[in-house]
Structures are given as structure tokens and as C-alpha cells.
Amino acid sequence: MKKILLVIRREYSTRVRKKSFWILTILLPILIAIVYATPVYLAQKPITTATVLVVDETEIFTHAFQSNKEVAYKRAGSLDYAKRQLEMDSANLIVFIPSRETTIPNDAFLYYRTDVPGSNVQSDIKQQLNTILHNVILEDVLNISPDDYESLTHTTIALHPKDIETGRDGFLEVKMILGIILAVIIYVAIFMFGGQVMQGVSEEKHSRIVEVMLCSLKPFQLMMGKVVGIGLVGLTQFALWVALSGAGLFAIKAANPTLFEQAEQRQNVTQIATKGTDMTTQLETAKMANDAIPNSQAFVLTQGLVAINFKLIIPLFLIYFLFGYLLYASLFAACGSLVDQGSDGQQFTLPVTIPLLLSLMLIPAMINEPGGTVATWLSIIPFTSPIAMMFRLPFGVSILEVAVSIALLILTFILCTWMAANIYKRGVLLFGKQISYRDIFRWFKRG
């Protein structure tokens, strides 16, 4: 055990001391935050208003255009006058609707001088042209007012999934996004740190350093030291990311305390199934609270995050990351011991990575049915459970399924570690020999 700890210490300290480790750890969350914050920042920037002259020979559209923050519409008597205004930079664009022999016009032209108009401006002009035309047809041809038509076509009913036992909202979109993020993190972590194990083993084999190290270590001790040491590097990185995320969330909560208070308030008042409480009264209270609290996208997202049981998800995330990584890292270590160069190990790593790729590819199927047969089996099978179970946890999974999944994952980890150790101790010392699956089968047959 002492020798394994020495290897763990060496692998951990070597990687943590690298500048690249700290650069990645600090910059990655910042880059992710920038990616998500940039659209919000750009949306809040002042908008330049484009002046559009409307030349309407049909007399249908002239007075119907509605100006807004992005586009200011003005009437122009003739196309020649509008062109002169455009040349004098008194306007940015010209919308010309020529007269037609038919009652309903079917063409309009957008003239510009130098800069091509942006897609938002073109979209606004096109939308207003079509809206005005539709309203004219509704009123003059079909004798239906635009307000009646709007009421008919845009009347919707909001669907709010709720847990009958707790009364909490479902927030399926928020849970789906969180599940995908957790699954992708597990996938990337296993690939990234497992690949480091394989690369480290193959490099030590290629440089023949491993032969010196095995003079004082057993192959199993060296393999487990590398696997656990690099795994601790991953845990350190995740711990730092969680700390940075927590600090960011605390800052957001401090800046917008009302948003979180309202989200928690709505979750509290929608618990309808508490024992000894009249359900009708609870429903009436919940309705009053829902009417009093706003429903902006930011609020819905905050409310969805508040409704998720992170106290359960975070420990389970660590468990699935730890044993999922140890399972695959041991297999990657075995693959690294079979080749002299890391780039030559594709024939061995492909079968190892297929379950991970399969579980990631089947996320759309799990989205359709988070509690369905496919999702359930993927979350129980050890080779796919780290990703599948991480996706399903925000939706709620029974304790029995989680217990069975973890138990099978741990047992499979022990079995695969034993198999990987047997492959490692034979393959790591075979330099310059092309190893095949037949050789591996022969090793196990001989014991």
C-alpha cells in the first residue's frame, strides 16, 4: 500500500504543479461564463434605429407600418424622392411596393445604398408586410377583424407538470438541460483523464522507464497508483470548479435576492399533498401565489434550479464519476500497456469507448422517456450507467435503482481492475511486439 501511495503522490503532484492544469481549471469556467453572458450583454446594448422610407403605390401599406426600437418607418411620396433621401444619408433603406393589376400585391423591394441591412431589420420589414396584407384580406375579404383572428390563433394554455406527492413543478426543460450537462461532464472527464492514463502508460513503456520502475514495484501497484493519482487530479479540478460555480451563484443571488426568494416562495406554496391538509385550500393558495409572482425566463430557470435536489445529486455525481473513472481508467491503462505508441491503441480503445459513445448517442431516447426501458437499462448496466444515471437523476430515480446501479458499477470495477491488472503486467514489458486479441485470450487461458 505504501508503494501505491508513492505512485499516487508522484502522479498527482506532477500534474497539479503544471501551469496548464491551473490555466485550464481557472480559464474554462470563465470561458463558459463568457459564452453564456455574451448574448445577454449584446442584447442589452443600445440598438441603432434604421430609418426606412415606404413608397407604396398600392396605398395598402403606407399608414400601417409600426415603428419600433430597431426600425423607424416614414412615408415617401415617390421612389425618386426616396432615392434622393437615401443618397443624402437622410434614410437607410427604401421599401417599394409597386402597384399590380391584381388586387393583392405579391412583390416588394428593399433598396439600400452601401451597407446590406441586417437580418433583424429585414425580418421586421417582411413580417410587417405580411401582417398588414393578412389583416387586409381578413377585413376586406373574409370580414374578420384582426383582433378576433389574433385571439383565435394565439390563445394558448400553459401546461405545468407537477409531482402529485410533493406538489412541486416538474420543470422538465431545466431538468433536461441539467441532465445533459451532467452526462457530458462525466463523458468528457472519463475520456480526458482516462486518456491521460493510457498516454502515461504508453509513454513510460516506450521510453523503457517502466522497466526501471518495476524493479521496485509490482505491476498492479504501478497501475493503480497511476489510475488513482490521475483520478485525484480530476477530483481536484472538479472541486475547484464547484467552488468557482458556488462563488458565482452566491454573487448572482446576492445581486438578485428577490428572484431566489420568489422562486422558493412559489415552491413552498405549491406543496399540495402534505398530510392533514385540505387539498382544495392548498390549490387555491398555490393559484394566488402563481398569479402574484412573475413568469420571466430568468425566474422560471431560477425556480427550476431551486426545485432540484442538489444535496442528492452532488454526492451521487461524485460516486459515479469516481467509480466510472476507475472502471474505464483501468481499462485504458490495460490498453496503454499493449502498445508502444499511444496513437497505436485504437484497435483496443474502440471496444472500450463504444459503451460511452452509445450512452451519449441515446440521450435523445432518454429525453423522450426518462423513466422508460432504454433509460432504465442504460442506467443499470455498469459501462453506461455513469452517463445515463447522471442524465436521469434530475428527473428523479428510485433509491432501489440507484443502489442496484452503484452496486453493479462497483462489482464491475473490481472485476475489470483484476482483468486489466493481468493484461497490464504482461503487456507493459512486451516492447516491439504486435499484440493481438488472441494473445490476450491466451494470457487469461494460461492464468
Image: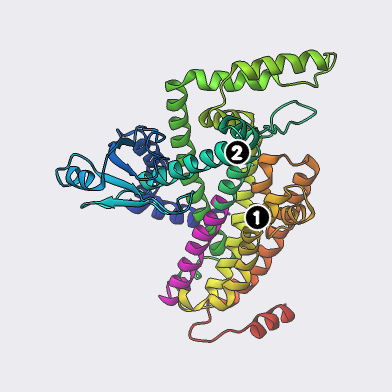
- Point out the image quarter for the N terminus: bottom right
Q: Is residue 284 left or right of residue 262?
A: right
Amino acid under label 2? Answer: Val
- The image position of residue 10, as x and y in percent, is 44, 55
Q: Is residue 398 magenta?
A: no
- Specify whether residue 226 is in view: no
* Residue ID at (54%, 73%): 337
- Point out the image quarter for the C terminus: bottom right
Q: Is residue 246 left or right of residue 150?
A: left
Label 1 environment density (alpha carbons within 10 Å; few <14, some 14–19, many ≥20): few
Q: Which residue is mark 2?
A: 174
In three-dimensional space, the C-alpha distance between marks 2 and 1, rounded to whole angstroms, equals 15 Å
Q: Magenta residues, as a range?
A: 185-211
- The image position of residue 250, as x and y in percent, is 46, 26
| Mark 2 / mark 1, whichever is N-terminal | 2
Q: Which mark is on residue 364? A: 1
- The image position of residue 58, as x and y in percent, is 39, 44
> Number of labelled discs?
2
Vertical placement of 159 versus 344: above or below?
A: above
* Residue ID at (54%, 86%): 434
Could you tell me which secondary element the residue under label 2 belongs to? helix
- The image position of residue 211, as x and y in percent, is 47, 74
The foreground one among 275 and 199 is: 275
Furthest-front residue in view?
A: 101
Amino acid under label 1? Answer: Pro
Label 2 environment density (alpha carbons within 10 Å; few <14, some 14–19, many ≥20): some
Corner quadrant of residue 101: bottom left
Vertical placement of 369 versus 396: above or below?
A: below
